[in-house]
Image (spheres, grey):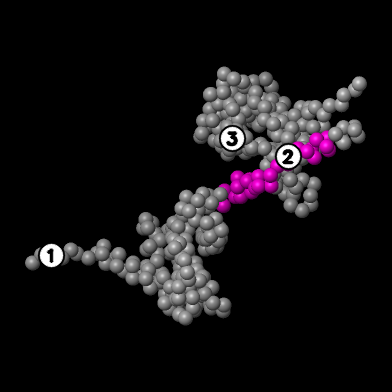
Amino acid sequence: HHERCLAPVAMPYKVVDWSSQRDDDRHAAANLANGPHGSMWESHGPPEQWLVFDFGMKVAVSSMQLRCTGLQMDPKDILLFRCGAEGSAAGANMLAKKDSSGDPVVVPDGPWIIARRCLVGAGPSGRSEKSAHNVPVGGGQRSRFWRLEVKEAWGGNRRVRILAPLVFHCLPLEQRSEDNVLAGMELQFQRQPSLTTMFSEVVNLSRENRDMRMIARKHGIPIDIAEKVLEDFKRFDVDKTGSLDFRDFVGLLRVLVARRQAGLSSKSAEEKMPESRVRGLWQTVDVDGSGRIEMEEFLVWFHFAFHVNVQEPEWSRHSDRVADSVAEQFYAALGSQRLRTMVNVNAQHSEPLQAV
């Protein structure tokens, strides 16, 4: 009796791209594939760090074996991705780079789809147990390019270190016809990855957008509002410093007013909202008096000035329109904000009454 087995095998690969490496010798990323005994990959800085692997053919990774040192540089929170657009003319962004030997290679720039995320039981607390940590992947999806991302090390802000070799066990691409049938049945009854894991802020968003989301969550601001504010902020940040001066701030507000009704020009908006009025608003935003406002300052002011505690739209104090838009809310609040600013300024400069 001949028993057929779909045992995964260790597959050779190349490390074709990486976020950083301490040097191009003993701590090079390429060591993970075929480095000498005692070699490793060590990043130049703390997480997030990543590596891209090319297997030369489409493979289904079933497990990954990480060898760690039992120190604070061991990876803790890791994600494994497969490339989801390779071979597709639409959406596959390919980058021309050079590998560790200086040979030209083509590396995909995504999109990357999460195959597995887990915590590695390494670090100082796991030193006495084992140095090799097996991470099951499963799923059965095949890809030529895979990406390993280390989001956190056991030492927090330490560099990342993985000992060579890093081993991937994969299902062979070519099977006999009977084995293909069995493999198809096995994958059919396996639990497929949830679509909710297909999106990762780290992979799919730029650093700028990730920072914006962190700020929004910090202040309890809805993400959709923060995204719109960031878009306007970037458009008026003409010198690309990440901040607005008074002139940029004036331009932004006048565009908001110009949107008040179709056909209203920026010149008309300037007449309706002169600089003297905007100056009072500027003083409420530039709380540190630096003469420039950062993205966080602008976002918090914008949200709490025009979006918070707005239950039912009020009638504008300046027209017969309902204040149901940002521009109308600006008009409805302009007089009260100016009055509030004047009261605060007078309170700061007024002298206390002297007893007679």
Residue 354 got which mark? Answer: 1
Q: Which residue is mark 2?
A: 191
The residue drawn where x is 79% and y is 32% is 171
Quick one: which residue is furthest to the left in this view?
356
Q: Is residue 185 magenta?
A: yes
Q: Of residues 337 and 231, which is closer to you in this image?
A: 337
The residue drawn where x is 55% and y is 55% is 223
Residue 248 left/right relative to 101: left
Q: Residues within 10 Å of mark 2 (few under 14, many from 20)?
A: few
The residue segment tinted magenta is 183-209
Residue 127 got which mark? Answer: none
The residue drawn where x is 59% and y is 23% is 69
In the picture, the quarter occupied by the C terminus is bottom left
What secondary structure is found at the residue carrying circle 1?
loop
The residue drawn where x is 80% and y is 27% is 7
Q: Which residue is mark 3?
A: 77
Q: Mark 1 or mark 2, which has the lower sequence index?
A: 2
Q: Mark 3 or mark 2, which has the lower sequence index?
A: 3
The picture places residue 139, in percent across and down from the top left corner, at: 74, 38
The amino acid marked with disc number 2 is Arg
What secondary structure is found at the residue carrying circle 2?
loop
What secondary structure is found at the residue carrying circle 3?
strand
The picture places residue 202, in percent across and down from the top left corner, at: 60, 45
The picture places residue 308, in percent across and down from the top left corner, at: 45, 62
Q: Quadrant of residue 331?
A: bottom left
Q: Residues within 10 Å of mark 1 (few under 14, many from 20)?
A: few
Q: CA distance from mark 3 to mark 2?
A: 23 Å
Q: CA distance from mark 3 to mark 1?
A: 66 Å
Q: In the image, which is nearer the foreground, mark 3 or mark 1?
A: 3
The amino acid marked with disc number 1 is Gln
Q: Residues within 10 Å of mark 3 (few under 14, many from 20)?
A: some
Q: Is residue 161 visible?
A: no
